[in-house]
Amino acid sequence: MPAPRLNTWLWVQAQLRTCNFNAIPAVVRHRGDPDLGAVILVHNRLADGCVAFSRVTLESGGVGWLRATGDTPVSEADAESYIERQIARDSDTWVIEIEDRDGRFQLDAPIV
């Protein structure tokens, strides 16, 4: 039996509060379905580029992150293009952007 999951809105709020507590700027760029919306998290390292992560459900029922824009950071324009394509495909997707020049932000689940 899979572990109980927080609804998406509550999870997003927790991430924003965690970032706020650690003085890491974070914003919701697109609001999706509050209960079951997909999540794209953009880790913007400013001059070092962006990585977009997509939240996925693992076979075990847990949560993981997929490097949606590839193994190396991309430009903000490339990350934006990916986001636009995903929202066009699923308008219930949440997009959170975290600006973190120093790389202090940590994902809450493994990268798969």
Image (tube, grey):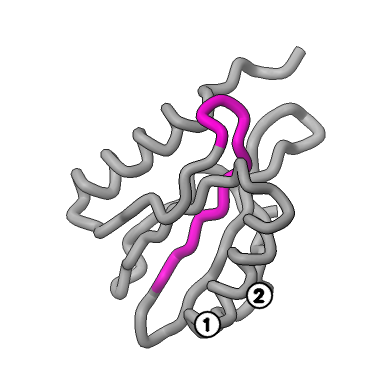
Q: Pointer 1: residues within 10 angstroms few (<14), some, or many (20+)?
A: few
Left or right of 39 in this view: 13: left
Of the two numbered discs 1 and 2 on the same chain, state the one appearing first in sequence.
2
Left or right of 25 in this view: 75: right
Which residue is pictured at 69% across the width and 48% down the height?
A: 90
| Occupied quadrant, residue 78 | bottom right
Which residue is pictured at 33% across the width and 54% down the height?
A: 27
* Mark 1 vs mark 2: in front: 1
The secondary element bearing badge 2 is classed as: loop
Q: Pointer 2: residues within 10 angstroms few (<14), some, or many (20+)?
A: few
Identify the residue position indicated by label 1 in the image: 77
Residue type, numbered disc 1:
Ala
Which residue is pictured at 41% across the width and 59% down the height?
A: 97
The magenta stretch is 33-44
Eyeballing the image, is 65 above or below 75? above
Which residue is pictured at 27% across the width and 39% down the height?
A: 17
Q: Quadrant of the N terminus?
A: top right
Q: Position of residue 22 (x, y in %)?
A: 21, 50
Residue type, numbered disc 2:
Asp
Identify the residue position indicated by label 2 in the image: 71
Q: Position of residue 68 (x, y in %)?
A: 67, 64
Number of numbered callouts drawn: 2
Which of these two is toward me, 6 or 111? 6
Q: Is residue 38 magenta?
A: yes
Q: Position of residue 32 (x, y in %)?
A: 54, 40
Q: Is residue 43 magenta?
A: yes
